[in-house]
Image (cartoon, rainbow, N blue to C red):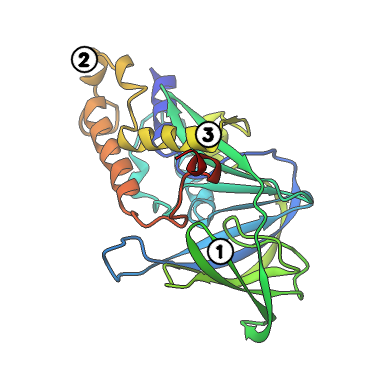
Amino acid sequence: MKKFFSIFFVILFAFASAQNTDSKETANRFFYELTFKPKKDSAKLEKVIMALDIVKDRSIYRDYTAIGQDSILKVQFDAMQKAGVFKDLSKSFKMPKFSEKIVKTYPDMKMQYIERVANGFTPMNLGYTETIKFDWKISNDKAKIGAYNAQKATTEFGGRTWTAWFSTDLPFQDGPYKFSGLPGLIVKIEDQDKNYSWVLQGNKQVPNWEELTYMEKLSNVGTKVTEMPREKFEKTFSDFKKDPFASARPMMTQEIMSRTIPGMDGTIGDMMKKQEKMYKDFFNANDNPIELNQKPVAEKKKK
């Protein structure tokens, strides 16, 4: 039963990130402030810090929230395991705003988009791979963005028109989210209607860098990603968002659902309901995706 609790806990809090090895590399970490409009019918904007970690052969983009509080969770989870008592840690950490992780490999810039889902009581990494050739139009306009001299470029992507500012002061042909392919790091990029706007806020070197967070290591998912065509991925992930516990529910007998958890109020069934609401609240908080045309071009041509 202790193993069951551990696995169940990891699944419930597996929004963080995923993928790759603990190779003790040194990473260049770039911090972007993302200002975004989560609801199409509201003018309200939200902000979050996103991280772009660049190592020798790849970059990893994800919400910094999980990384930033990883050490705190490790201390609390270690204490919980030593005490042998299950605790609800959901109030001890802040949920990230974005659950995806994007890995770009160098030099071909092949991009892997990854989400964490549940397969029964086992978390798994689900993803698709694509290579995007951005049609950048570089202008002669220049500006100072933060501490960097930058130049303007525009492109069409995901049903939106984007304006980017890149700096050759930073010798990386990369940027936040899926954006890449300019002769320098993108230090600012936003769409025409300012639904999404990333601005570089700072950077630092991270020695002994590890891609997996402590919580990811506990889940034993590691770096393995179940790959599928983008269309199938979107259908699978959409189904998961509608019913996060669909694959686990058949295993939950009435006897299991009625069991209490040491150190917590309520039953396993109560906790499942609470966590299901947490999942759905998380996914329903944003109905304004970065890419408006979610289906791949090949699928659209069939219509």
Circle 1: residue type:
Glu
**Label at residue 156:** 1
Few, some or many C-alpha atoms within 10 Å of disc 2 (few <14, some 14-19, many ≥20)? few
Rate crowding at label 1 as few (under 14), some (14 to 19) or many (20 or more) other CA atoms within 10 Å: some
Q: Do the residues labelled 1 and 3 touch (CB within 8 Å)?
A: no
In the image, residue 50 above or below residue 108: below
The structure residue drawn at horizontal position 51% and vertical position 68%, both measured from the top left corner, is 161
Q: Distance between the residues labelled 2 and 1?
A: 52 Å
250 above or below 192?
Answer: above
Q: Considering depth in this image, is 236 or 121 the residue closer to the camera? A: 236
- The Cα atoms of the two marked residues, 3 and 2, are separated by 30 Å
Which quarter of the rendered picture does the C terminus lie within? top left
Task: Locate residue 36 relative to residue 55 in the image: left or right.
Answer: left
Q: Residue 54 occupies which quadrant of the picture?
A: bottom right
Q: Badge 3: how crowded within 10 Å, few (<14), some, or many (20+)?
A: many
Q: Earlier in the sequence, mark 2 or mark 1?
A: 1
| Disc sitting over residue 126 in the figure | 3
What amino acid type should be assigned to the residue bearing mark 3? Leu
